[in-house]
Amino acid sequence: MHVRPSSTPASDRPRSPAAQFATPDRLSDYWRFYWAVAEAQIARWLPEAPSRLLDLSSPDYQGTPRAVAAGHDVVALLPSADSAVRRPLRLVNGRAAVPRPARRGRLRQIVGDAAFPRFLAAESFDGVIADNRVLSRQLATEESVAEIARVLRPGGRVLLCVDSVVLGMALLAEQDCWPELSHAPSADVLLVPWPDGSITRCFTAEQLTDTLTEAGLELEWIKPRTVLSASTVEMMLARDPRSMNRLVEMELRATESDDYVGVHLVAAARKPL
């Protein structure tokens, strides 16, 4: 009697690298690590003195509670009133200590277009946070960055995160878009379809630098969000679940290099005085 081997359920099959980043599972070991790195990066970027910040990064961005807890007043743009936080913010990241501020910051949530916040007054913010890939989801990135420069006060700073060409090429390869893939590294603008039907704009470090400088901003630094692979992170956490802090510190040291191999690029820039 021949017994056909049972197929592995789709939910148990390992996801491809591209799919892992296109449909993140925030409860997985890798994504817990990813957001721990993101919170450590914003903690290093936040101004020392209490400041007025604009957050364009979507309601689920986990850096907003950290900014408020550090004493900054944050204006967060929401796509709709339904996405507003209904309960008081509390610091939920137990991985890194936050110094107790002289005062707790305030959060103000307003509905508005994060891509083109033209209703906001010019030079009204000390800093802008455009994390969580928000500028890659807005395909007219140059206009969005110009708006960021407009609302920044002289000397104000921006922290942003975009999809990289590395991720774009992985997504194209997974979708068998070989003609498009062959031209991807040299394309002036790389637009890539995601599995959910949306479109993402992917950048090289040079393209992101040009976008910032053309808007009148001065680049401070640019680096990958993470360089450790998902498989490496998951293997190390499986061996020692208590190694999260060591992994984050290892990642922060690794991204000090000039090797832009990550799937997401993080950059900081300043508006000249």
Image (cartoon, rainbow, N blue to C red):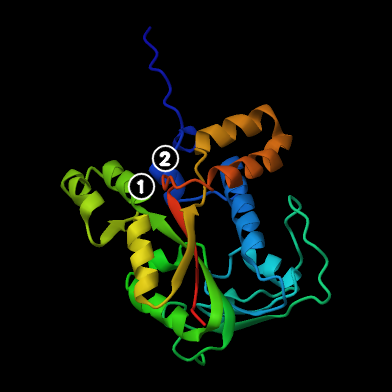
Q: Nearer the viewer, residue 224 or 256?
A: 256
Where residue 102 sits in the image (x, y, percent)? 84, 75
Where residue 163 sits in the image (x, y, percent)? 40, 56
The first of marks 1 and 2 along the sequence is 2
Task: Look at mark 2 in the image and give the residue it sits on.
Answer: 17
Which quarter of the image is occupied by the N terminus?
A: top left
Q: Nearer the viewer, residue 12 or 260?
A: 260
SS assignment at label 2: helix
> As drawn, is 41 to the left or to the right of 158?
right
Amino acid type assigned to the residue bearing label 1 in the image:
Val
> As drawn, is 114 to the left or to the right of 204?
right
- Would residue 245 be visible to someone looking at this image? yes
The structure residue drawn at horizontal position 32% and vertical position 61%, both measured from the top left corner, is 207
Count of labels in the image: 2
Amino acid type assigned to the residue bearing label 2 in the image:
Pro
Relative to 111, residue 210 above or below:
above
- Would residue 198 be visible to someone looking at this image? no
Task: Look at mark 1 in the image and give the residue it sits on.
Answer: 166
